[in-house]
């Protein structure tokens, strides 16, 4: 049932773990590039993450955001190796006080766990290469992607995952996410390193497709709403019936959340691409 896989891409090492093999949404990839580990994997996979961490020395642990699949082993890695995680200021704050996670996510990833992370320094480097942190809220209010401009690689956190979306968490916000995607598309990169999807070549093009998809979905949803159609009808028309995940999560992760958030897109600020 569980997922365990490792692969290499140029000088990048990757370990995929997960309790359930239900596709990319229930598995997670921990990346190691030269002296740096990016995100930690979930706490219920520690038995597999630990040997990966121990297999080679590293000196930096970089976190993208607080979600339990990304930060769940941060405290354990710190205790094991003495390497203190570094993270955006908001992530540091959330990890210090701890946070509650919905029951469904607890089943998939395990508990969240606190961590004593330090705020990102002004100058972040991976193996001597410059890193540009790009603040990208929308999926989570603290999320930051890490761009390596010299090689055109982007550690994309949960900004990409797929070039479409069918379900949205109740704490996600499409207008903010669109702003973040647009900010990232203002930079040059070719390769997305996604902790769920894996290595995505032509990454900028794929991310642009997601941006266009969300804008089109928002335009369609708003048109139907203007015709007086109700939320559930719009949702079914554009995305189909709610699936099992929506029901099990009590609509915390659902199609209707995505439509609600799409209805908040202000098209005077997000003009449709020609
Ligand atoms: Zn996340």
Image (cartoon, grey):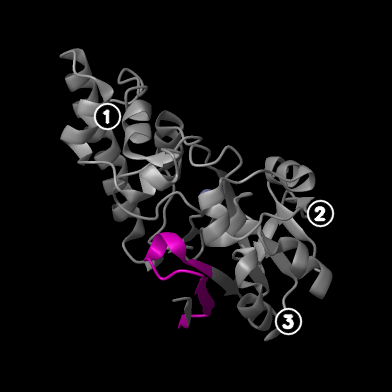
Closest to the observer, 43 or 78: 43
Is 35 on the left-hand or right-hand side of 203? right
Check if residue 24 falls in the magenta segment: yes
- Pick the quarter of the image with the C terminus: top left
Q: Are marks 3 and 2 in contact (CB under 8 Å)?
A: no
Label disc, if present, on residue 198 of the rendered structure: none
Q: Which residues are magenta?
A: 6-29
Residue 114 location, x and y as percent? 76, 53
Q: Tell me the quarter of the picture where residue 225 sits.
A: top left
Q: Earlier in the sequence, mark 3 or mark 1?
A: 3
Q: Residues within 10 Å of mark 1 (few under 14, many from 20)?
A: many
In the image, what residue occupies the spot 20% across and 35% down? Answer: 236
Instruction: Tell me the SS state at disc 3.
Output: loop
Residue linked to disc 1: 218
Residue located beneath label 2 in the image:
116
Measuring from the top left, give residue 146's x and y in whole percent: 56, 55
Q: As rendered, which of 217 and 102 lies closer to the eye?
A: 102
Q: Is residue 71 above or below residue 60?
A: above
Which callout, 3 or 2, points to the residue nearer the camera?
A: 2
How far is mark 1 from mark 2, CA to CA? Answer: 39 Å
Residue 86: percent from left, percent from top: 73, 56
Q: Secondary structure at mark 2?
A: loop
Task: Give the residue at mark 3.
Answer: 57
Query: Is the residue indicated by label 2 positioned so its CB lies within 8 Å of ligand 1?
Result: no
Answer whether residue 176 is visible to the viewer in this image: yes
Of 221 and 198, nearer the camera is 221
């Amino acid at each position: 049932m569980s997922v365990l896989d490792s692969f290499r891409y140029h000088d990048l090492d990757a370990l995929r773990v997960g309790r359930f093999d239900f596709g990319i949404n229930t598995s997670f990839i921990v990346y190691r590039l030269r002296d740096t580990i990016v995100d930690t994997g979930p706490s219920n996979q520690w038995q597999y993450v630990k040997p990966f961490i121990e297999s080679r020395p590293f000196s930096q642990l970089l976190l993208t955001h607080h979600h339990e699949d990304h930060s769940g082993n941060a405290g354990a890695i710190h205790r094991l190796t003495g390497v203190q995680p570094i993270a955006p200021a908001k992530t540091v704050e959330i990890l210090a006080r701890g946070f509650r996670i919905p029951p469904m996510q607890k089943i998939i990833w395990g508990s969240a766990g606190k961590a004593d992370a330090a705020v990102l320094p002004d100058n972040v480097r991976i193996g001597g290469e410059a890193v540009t942190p790009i603040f990208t809220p929308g999926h989570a209010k603290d999320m930051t992607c890490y761009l390596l401009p010299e090689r055109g690689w982007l550690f994309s956190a949960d900004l990409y995952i797929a070039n479409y979306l069918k379900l949205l968490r109740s704490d996600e916000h499409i207008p903010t996410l669109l702003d973040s995607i647009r900010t990232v598309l203002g930079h040059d990169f070719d390769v997305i390193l996604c902790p769920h999807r894996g290595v995505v070549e032509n990454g900028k093009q794929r991310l642009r497709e997601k941006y266009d998809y969300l804008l089109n979905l928002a335009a369609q949803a708003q048109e139907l709403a203007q015709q007086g159609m109700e939320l559930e009808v719009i949702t079914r028309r554009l995305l189909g019936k709610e699936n099992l995940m929506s029901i099990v999560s009590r609509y915390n992760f659902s199609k209707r959340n995505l439509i609600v958030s799409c209805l908040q897109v202000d098209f005077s600020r997000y003009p449709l691409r020609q």
